[in-house]
Amino acid sequence: MPYHLCSDCVKAENNVEGEDADGQGGLGRGAAGSGRGRGNRFRGGGREDWGMRNQDVSTGDLFVCSLAFLKILLCLDWDRLNERLAGLSAPTHDLPPQDTREKKFTGRCRLYIGNLTNDVTEDEITQLFQPYGETAELFVNKEKNFAFIRLDYRANAEKAKRELDGQMRKGRALKVRFAPHSAAVKVKNLTPWVSNELLEKAFAVFGEIERAVIIVDERGKSMGEGIIEFARKPGAQMALRRCSDGCFFLTASLRPVVLEPFEQLDDIDGYAEKNLPKKNPDYYKAREVGPRFAAPGSFEYEYGTRWKQLHELYKQKEEALQREMKMEEEKLEAQMEYARYEHETEILREQLRQRELDRERQKREWEMKERQAEEQRLADEERMRRQQEEMQLRMHHQEEEMRRRQQENTLFMQVILRFGT
């Protein structure tokens, strides 16, 4: 269902962004807005006492410390994001269907209440919306006479808006509108293969998501765009920052998603007569003449025709630009596929070269092992030959020693026999 907006809602939302408790700026400001909010604590004094005895810390030192602390936080956020992204690289076939049950207290149930008086209280506003369901996150700005409140369900918020808008309070007609979703982003450059489920699964790494939907035409065909509503503003800011700094792909295609803050338009309430600035003199000048057809050949008809021609020229140029962009997209797709083919071919060539190098290395290792085995075999044969020669030499010496002793024994016996005779 489309959002309800008015200029008062947008102005009040911008004022509230600077007064949020987390001190962070609106969407699109990134780290600069966040740093500005947190930097308020370091204003208002040349020196501050942080409990360090006999030590003074200058404002510049505190600013440097705050920057270092913010850098540490960003590094931690990046590490946690990388851990969550590591689980997304697997195939995403047949994702389970989305949980379509309505969540309570979403950003789509947040109402703006304008034209209040400065004596309004939170209890009064709470009692005013109590018949329409549970309420939460009430914010009142008594200086600028507006407030924000969040109801439990969209149907209750619509009922409260329908019944309370224009209701008189202390001589003033209340202005009740749907507040802009401060944590919504628009996703562009999507491929036809991105579904609601894949969109939610991919961007859930940045934070809790209330709603993720792909925009389709009257035939249900994807328009290449989608809307993501985060539960909290930091999640939307991180998604905008990361997708702006890097290339985030949702499918095998090399078309990165493009994120931008979602500008919500009102096509339900429109621009009522009571909202016109009737004190402006141009209002009465424009309303002096009512609706009519111009007579052919008249002054009105001539310049009306020129306006129509200008509109037709704009339409033709817009169509020509769309055709040109379509041709550029097809050209980029063809270049991308050719580059992918070349890249994959080069990878296969590199793998083949690596396999050849590995095979050559294995061949050299086998040859070296074979040469070492041959050398070891020759060394073993040489050692066995030497051992055999040494054994034969010892046996020869032993035989000569035995013959010598036998001769000595024979001579000794002959001597004994000769003297005995």
Image: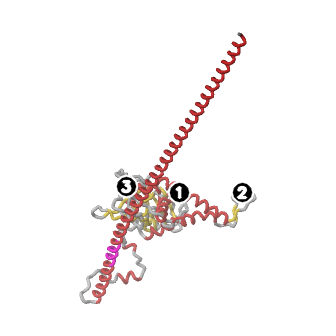
Say whether residue 399 is left or right of residue 257.
right
Image point (39%, 68%), residue name: 265
Residue position marked by numbered label 2 in the rendering: 52
**Taking the image as drawn, is residue 4 in sight?**
yes
Q: Position of residue 384 (x, y in %)?
A: 55, 35
Tell me which amino acid carries mark 3: Glu
Under circle 3, the secondary element is helix
| Region rendered in magenta | 317-325
Label count reads: 3
Depicted 5 relative to depicted 316: above or below: above
Q: Position of residue 29 (x, y in %)?
A: 51, 67
Q: Quadrant of residue 2?
A: bottom left
Mark 3–mark 1 CB contact (< 8 Å): no
Q: Quadrant of residue 296?
A: bottom left
Depicted 350 relative to depicted 397: above or below: below
Magenta segment, prevailing SS (helix, strand or loop): helix
Which numbered marker is on residue 327? Answer: none
Please identify the residue farthest to the left as the structure is shown. Answer: 296
Of the residues tagged 3 and 2, which is closer to the observer? 3
First in residue order: circle 3 vs circle 1: 1
Residue position marked by numbered label 1 in the rendering: 77
Tell me which amino acid carries mark 2: Met
Front residue (pair 79, 266) = 79
Tell me which amino acid carries mark 1: Asp
Residue position marked by numbered label 3 in the rendering: 197
Q: Marks 3 and 1, how far apart in space?
A: 24 Å
